[in-house]
Image (spheres, rainbow, N blue to C red):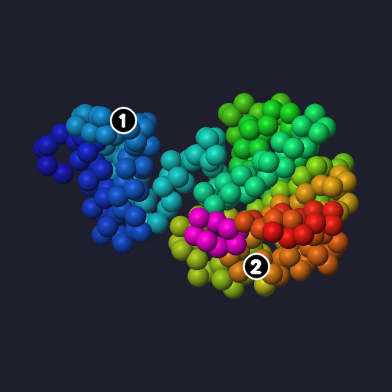
Amino acid sequence: MSGQPDTVCLLIAEARRRFAEAELADPSTDARVLVAGVLGLSLSDVVMRGDAAVSHEEAEQVRVAITRRCKHEPVHRILGHRAFYGLDLRLSPETLEPRPDTEILVDCVLPHLKRMIAEKGSARLLDLGVGTGAIALALLKECPQARAVGSDISEEALSTAERNAYINGVAERFETVRSAWFANIKGRFDIIVSNPPYIPTGVVAELDPEVRDYDPFAALDGGQDGLDAYRALSTGAGNFLQTNGLVVVEIGYDQKKSVTALFENAGFSLLEAHRDYGGNDRVLLFTTRNCCAC
């Protein structure tokens, strides 16, 4: 590097150039978010303090992070956390990185959760495959009268979810259970939610390296046809739901018909179906009541 002092703007420009050379999808956004995150700045700080000098040590930390991103490590994996529905969630190697599309699931559940609380005074949730805790913790944050159980097969994921519950101020209403789907679950719940693995095994290797190489395989692999988790969810959920309870799942873009068939064969009715920001089918709500699909 030249003798010119490093500034925030210069580091962002360097990151953007290197990311473009690495043929990353969005060099400009990645550069701003990564540099700001490493330096502990907000994106508005970057605009206001772009000409501020950066110490040699800070600049080296930024360049190490830039190199990692050039190898396709996701920005938020490098930073160790990301925002989700107003929460700050820590990530770990055993947790799926929450995606913006999953916020749609939270949006879909909230009206039903609030209605149940208005009717009963409280509500109990189960988040199967809890990962970082994103879904359950977002719902708890929005609804102080709700309580949630988060289950996962990974102890590290459960520890991460517990830490996130503490960081976001809902730990007293959140508990975790190590369980393969319903194996160790006890009691009944008003709403069961899940963003399960739904990628067919043979497709996982074809995913973008940011996903394939950094999200845990167990959180991606849905079996030969991508439907293994939905089979377990549809056949088991009825034993753990309160009367008129809901099951809400995220699905792959082409799985609405097959997932709906699994749940209908298990005695559920499709209550609502919602699309993601790209217009793809993404969230399905099922009920044990006899309701018509939307």
Q: Residue at x 77, y 32 (%)?
A: 118
Q: Position of residue 129 (x, y in %)?
A: 69, 50
Q: Quadrant of residue 39?
A: top left
Q: Which residue is mark 1?
A: 45
- Residue numbers of the magenta segment: 275-282
| Depicted 37 relative to depicted 254: above or below | above
- Residue at 26% across / 43% down in the picture? 12
**Residue type, label 1:** Asp
Callout 2, which amino acid? Answer: Gln
Q: Is residue 64 left or right of residue 108?
A: left
Could you tell me if residue 57 is visible in this image? no
Q: Quadrant of residue 117?
A: top right
Q: Nearer the viewer, mark 2 or mark 1?
A: 2
Which label was assigned to residue 255?
A: 2
Q: Eyeballing the image, is 138 above or below 24?
A: above
Tell me residue 228's x, y (percent): 73, 65
Rendered-image quadrant of the C terminus? bottom right
Is 52 included in the stretch rendered in magenta?
no
Can you say which quadrant of the picture contains the N terminus? Answer: top left
